[in-house]
Structure formats: structure tokens, C-alpha cells
Amino acid sequence: LFRSLEQIEKANNLLPDDPTILDHLGDIASVLNHIDKAIDCWKQSFLLDPKNSSVSSKLTAHGIDIDGLLREQEKLKDNTEQKNKD
């Protein structure tokens, strides 16, 4: 399992915005009981691919408000866009 973690972390370093890699990294972290890391990975995966019901189910199972997460991302996006206009 630790070898799997090592390999998926290498893949994540090469492709940090790949939602599938982030999802699998979260799964491995969860099995290793690194729940905070798992949730962070799943959040990143979800924000890159909000239609992935598997990831949204994992987040919901850990008490994460999916709609709140999307609203938070939208706020950050709006703030970034506003700063770029200024």
C-alpha cells in the first residue's frame, strides 16, 4: 500500500490537476487513515470535476457540504477576476 501511495504521489506531481489521480490519492490516504489528506485530495478532485458522483459521495460521507464547497470556489473565482480587473 505504501508503494501505491508513493507511485500515485509521483503521478500527482507530474499531473497535479488530474481529478482521477487526486481521487485515487485520496482513496489511498483514506485507507492509511490520513483522513485530512484524503478529504483535501477529494476536494481538489471534485472542484476539477464536479460531476464525479463517486468523489462527491466520498466527501458527503465525511460531512463535507458539496454545495458550500462549490459556492466557496465561485467566490474565490469572482475575487480573483475582480483583482485582475483592478
Image (cartoon, rainbow, N blue to C red):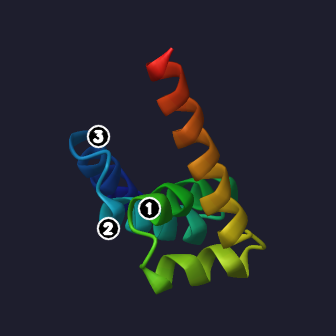
Label ID, residue 74: none
Tell me, yes or no, if residue 1 can be seen here: no
Instruction: Out of 40 and 47, give the one closest to the viewer.
Output: 47
Residue at the (44%, 61%) spot, across then down: 45
Q: Amino acid at mark 2?
A: Thr
Tell me, yes or no, if residue 59 can be seen here: yes
- Give the spatial CA distance, label 2 vs label 1: 7 Å
Q: Position of residue 83 (x, y in %)?
A: 53, 21
Q: Quadrant of residue 38?
A: bottom right
Residue linked to disc 2: 20
- Give the spatial CA distance, label 1 vs label 3: 14 Å
Label 1, residues with CA under 10 Å away: few <14, some 14-19, many ≥20: many
Residue at the (48%, 85%) spot, across then down: 53
Work out whether mark 2 precedes mark 3 in sequence or the reverse, and give the earlier one. Answer: 3
Q: Amino acid at mark 3?
A: Asn
Q: Are marks 2 and 3 in contact (CB under 8 Å)?
A: no
Work out whether mark 1 precedes mark 3 in sequence or the reverse, and give the earlier one. Answer: 3
Looking at the rendered image, the disc whose residue lies closer to the viewer, 1 or 3, is 1
Residue linked to disc 3: 13
Q: Position of residue 27 (x, y in %)?
A: 49, 71
Q: Quadrant of residue 79?
A: top right
Label 3, residues with CA under 10 Å away: few <14, some 14-19, many ≥20: few
Q: Are marks 2 and 1 in contact (CB under 8 Å)?
A: yes
Q: Position of residue 24 (x, y in %)?
A: 39, 68
